[in-house]
Amino acid sequence: MQKSSYDPLHLFINGAWLAAAGRDTAAVINPATGATLGRLPLATTADLAGALETARDSFDIWRRTVPAERARVLRKAATLMRERAEHIATMLTLEEGKPLAESRDEVLRAADYFEWFAEEARRIDGRVVPANRPGVQQLVKRQPIGPVAAFTPWNFPAITPARKLAAALAAGCSIILKPGEESPATALALARCLDDAGLPKGVLQVVFGVPDRVSAQLIASPVIRKVAFTGSMPVGRLLSERAAAGVKPITLELGGHGPVLVFADADIDAAAKDGAANRFRGTGQICIASTRFLIQSDAYHRFAERFVAATRQLVIGDGMAPETQLGPLANPRQLAKMEALVADAVEQGATLLTGGKRIDRPGYFFAPTVLADVPMSARIMHEEPFGPIAVLRPFDTLEDGLAEANRLPYALSAYAFTRDARTALDVGDGLEAGMVGINQYRIVATELPFGGMKESGHGSEGGTEGIAAYLTNKFISQAHF
Ligand code: NAD
């Protein structure tokens, strides 16, 4: 059953769907079972050189394609994604592990981004600026920046490519996408929707390979004028350096260590119950996940009790099973990291309230874990776990809470719960994060900018802001004859 649900894997270069045909391949593993789903062809140096040439040539065609036509292609692709959502979602769950309902939601939200940016394509306007000299007309135009190299991770294989592809294509850029090798079929299915929607040959290309070699070759090429990356901080830093060498702008969406400030006057039960659901969604492999729960001392014990109770009710299993709320981790590396983080925290004096160990079954399962009174010396107070571990700590005053929330170089998402309007205002202003949720954990929407501050990255994806990264300004100052 699983075999027929999972498409054969290809490279998509210059409009051709290329099978392995003598190239190296990598196995794609179902993290819930350990079974091999397929083999992924890896691009050679010559493949990438060909893709770069194509990106240069197709940019010339796509940037001249009128906005209404670019919008038509993106809208049609969104329609195809919705029609194919069930099939794409099934592949997403098989290769990434998340529950099927979440995969469905992700694919539909990816389609929303294509529709949103289809509209934005028609709103790329400019300005006429009055000149300080007679007989001069000054125009400010916004033009597509050029061919893009984009790198996306395995955890959201539909949404993270969608934010980049939709914005770049709306702007008139050609784009080479390298999705995560762990979950390649989803991004390929999105590319198939764009191909079937009539995107001209070569405007979008999808490659896989040894990530470091692919990014080194693509970013060094003079063809590429813009880089976009979602992934970890160390890789983001490396790609920044590579982009800087060619003076190319880069959009970075890196990790997070989301603090949650729970004030004693808040709806503690809701903050705890929804907090557990949010912390463990995607098995904690979400960059905007809530991680550090900072609870005002008077509410600490009640919050901890409710949080642990909600955590224990979560159903863990294969994402294809309808009752599953929590799937596996992506790979054995992540399992080993969870074990090490828990062992370190407990050794430093933290209290393990629930979980803390692997689950004895095939696949990469780790029990949702709650650690209380975690000392500042513990690794997990400094490192993003990117897995199902929640940290609880008390705080006393607003100032103390904000200081701890803002302590780390991570500044992607932050949350606060309070019924006091003044406190809500102060934390809204004071939290250092690109995205802040107050009295709720839902902070992502197509119409909102998505992005971080500090070392969590820079640039916004989504919203009216999302297209700017793929446009460049040019002025034309024209004197009359
Ligand atoms: P990673 O940064 O090593 O990998 C993420 C993606 O980047 C993968 O698809 C990988 O193929 C690619 N990549 C790795 N090295 C690369 C290179 N030299 N050049 C180009 N691409 C490269 O992270 P990981 O270990 O796979 O995942 C865990 C970490 O990823 C977490 O700690 C988290 O910070 C980060 N992450 C962040 C987000 C986000 O939205 N900000 C999303 C997913 C993962």
Image (tube, rainbow, N blue to C red):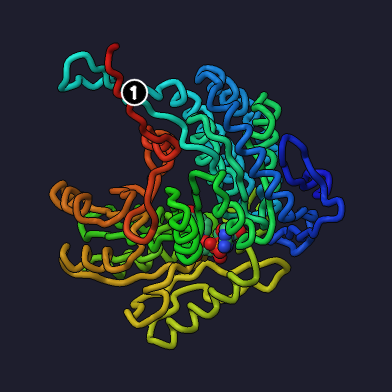
Name the residue located 67 percent from the left edge and 24 percent from the top edge.
198
Q: Amino acid at mark 1?
A: Gly
Q: Residue furthest left?
A: 422
Q: Quadrant of residue 72?
A: top right
Crowding at dot 1, Cα within 10 Å, few <14 / some 14-19 / many 20+, comes out as some
Name the residue located 60 percent from the left edge and 48 percent from the top edge.
157
Residue 179 placement (x, y as % from top left):
62, 50
Q: Quadrant of residue 59?
A: top right
Q: Residue furthest right?
A: 21
In the rendered image, the vertical position of residue 340 relative to residue 326, given as above or below:
below
Considering the numbered disc 1 on the image, is that residue within a helix, a strand or a loop? loop
Q: Residue furthest front?
A: 481
Name the residue nearer the viewer: 421 or 59. Answer: 59
* Residue 303 placement, left or right of 396: right
Q: Which residue is mark 1?
A: 126
* Residue 139 placement, left or right of 314: left
Name the residue nearer the viewer: 123 or 131. Answer: 131
Question: In which quadrant is the C terminus drawn?
Answer: top left
Name the residue located 37 percent from the left edge and 40 percent from the top edge.
449
Q: Residue furthest top?
A: 481
* Number of disc labels: 1
Name the residue nearer the viewer: 151 or 88. Answer: 151
Residue 238 placement (x, y as % from top left):
49, 63
Residue 25 placement (x, y as % from top left):
79, 58
Where does ligand 1 appear, by image quarter?
bottom right
In the rendered image, the vertical position of residue 477 relative to residue 19, given as above or below:
above
